[in-house]
């Protein structure tokens, strides 16, 4: 899979946050969240703008012609309008053909996993061959200035992933989960984000081990077969706890959100791109991907590189 | 594990110096915040315990943490 991502130009550092929230220091924020800075969309900058930039970056980097795309998918909870669907606007901005399918869906932290499953299904069903899958969020627009616990964590960003027939064959079986009873634990109401951090943390600690076991079983694998775990980069403390509770080796468990923050549905593709750029992805490796959060919704798969 | 050892473990996860906490100490005096809550939930999890969001927001003292996390 070819991946590109973008982050807004505006940066919010821990020093700036520590100046506002005087009972926290920049070092404490970094130690607990693993985040030193996060990128924030400007007032006039939307998730659609970021999505467009991510795709154009992918096209430029990999020499992809817009007319090579035969299906467009956009995962965002930061839609441009209530209607029409943002993916239609994205089609026009990108100049990809008009005779293709395009669909938006509004998942958050599990969105990348669900997008991969939809892409795999579309290709397996013979409905598409080259799918452009975009994730884009501007959660920071929903965060109240006084909400330090979420303001320290979330950053804005977008990622574009190109999935062709060969890529789809390398995406394994999926494990999915949904529990709308937890909807109130992370919700935007009246354009204001609320997160019950302790409950989201408990949910994650409960669901991750079960989902790991399920996705391994569905792929006929054991944990020994997994070369790398790339989970939703929620925050460092949560990831460290997941790793410890599940006995996962540190060198196989990717954590890096220091200069991005939690970019919701884009954290996994950003992590994959960072790993690729660092030369850590090798042919034949098996990588477990897992997303979990708002919904409540979760999902996992194993890809073979 | 003795009660003092448990309190020292709490001090450790809350980034407090060993020996500075007592069971009757109000949490508000030690910088209790959302990050501390997650640390205590993680501590409890390693002890096979689950503390809900509602429960932890009602905690007043180090003793409340002690009772729930071990």
Image (cartoon, coloured by chain):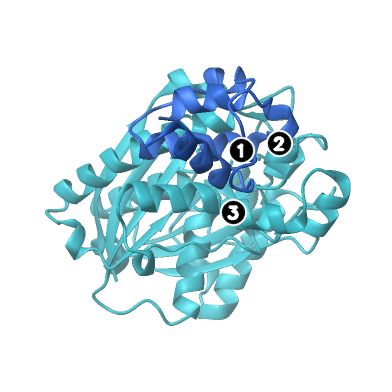
Chain colours: A cyan, B blue
Q: Secondary structure at mark 1?
A: helix
Question: Which of the two discs, 2 and 1, sits closer to the camera?
Answer: 2
Whether labels 2 and 1 belong to a single chain: the reply is: yes
Q: Earlier in the sequence, mark 2 or mark 1?
A: 2
Q: What's the residue at 45%, 31% (across, down)?
A: B3
- Residue of label 3: A91
> Going by the picture, which residue comes out furthest to the right?
A19
Q: Secondary structure at mark 3?
A: helix
Horizontal side of A39 relative to A103 (left or right) equals right
Which image quarter holds the N terminus of chain A? Answer: bottom left
Return the residue nearer the eye: A28 or A232: A28
Q: What's the residue at 82%, 58% (across, down)?
A: A15
On what subunit does the disc labeled 1 rest?
A: B
Return the residue nearer the eye: A155 or B51: B51
On what subunit does the disc labeled 3 rest?
A: A
- Residue of label 1: B36
Give residue B18's position: percent from left, percent from top: 59, 47
- Residue of label 2: B30
Q: Secondary structure at mark 2?
A: helix
């Amino acid at each position: 899979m070819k991946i590109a991502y973008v982050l807004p130009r505006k940066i919010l550092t821990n020093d700036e946050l520590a100046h506002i929230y005087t009972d926290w220091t920049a070092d404490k924020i970094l130690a607990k969240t693993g985040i030193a800075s996060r990128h924030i969309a400007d007032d006039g900058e939307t998730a659609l703008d970021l999505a467009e930039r991510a795709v154009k970056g992918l096209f430029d980097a990999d020499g992809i012609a817009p007319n090579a795309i035969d299906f467009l998918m956009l995962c965002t909870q930061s839609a441009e309008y209530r209607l029409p669907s943002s993916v239609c606007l994205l089609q026009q901005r990108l100049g990809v053909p008009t005779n293709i399918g395009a669909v938006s869906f509004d998942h958050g932290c599990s969105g990348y996993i669900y997008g991969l499953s939809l892409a795999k299904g579309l290709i397996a069903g013979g409905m598409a061959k080259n799918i452009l899958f975009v994730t884009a969020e501007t959660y920071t627009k929903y965060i109240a200035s006084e909400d330090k616990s979420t303001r320290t964590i979330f950053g804005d960003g977008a990622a574009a992933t190109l999935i062709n027939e060969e890529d789809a064959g390398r995406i394994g079986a999926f494990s999915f989960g949904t529990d709308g009873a937890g909807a109130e634990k992370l919700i935007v109401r009246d354009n204001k984000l609320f997160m019950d951090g302790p409950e989201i943390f408990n949910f994650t600690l409960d669901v991750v081990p079960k989902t790991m076991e399920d996705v391994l079983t569905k792929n006929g694998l054991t944990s020994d077969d997994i070369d790398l775990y790339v989970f939703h980069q929620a925050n460092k403390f949560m990831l460290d706890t997941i790793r410890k509770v599940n006995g996962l080796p540190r060198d196989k468990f990717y954590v890096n959100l220091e200069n991005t923050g939690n970019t919701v549905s884009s954290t996994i593709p950003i992590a994959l791109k960072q790993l690729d750029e660092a030369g850590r992805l090798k042919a034949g490796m098996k990588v477990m991907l897992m997303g979990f959060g708002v919904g409540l919704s979760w999902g996992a798969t194993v890809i073979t590189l | 594990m003795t009660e003092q050892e448990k309190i020292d473990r709490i001090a450790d996860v809350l980034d407090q110096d060993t020996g500075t906490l007592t069971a009757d100490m109000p949490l508000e005096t030690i910088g209790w915040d959302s990050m501390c809550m997650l640390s205590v939930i993680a501590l409890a999890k390693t002890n096979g315990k689950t503390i809900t969001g509602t429960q932890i927001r009602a905690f007043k003292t180090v003793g409340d943490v002690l009772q729930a996390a071990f």
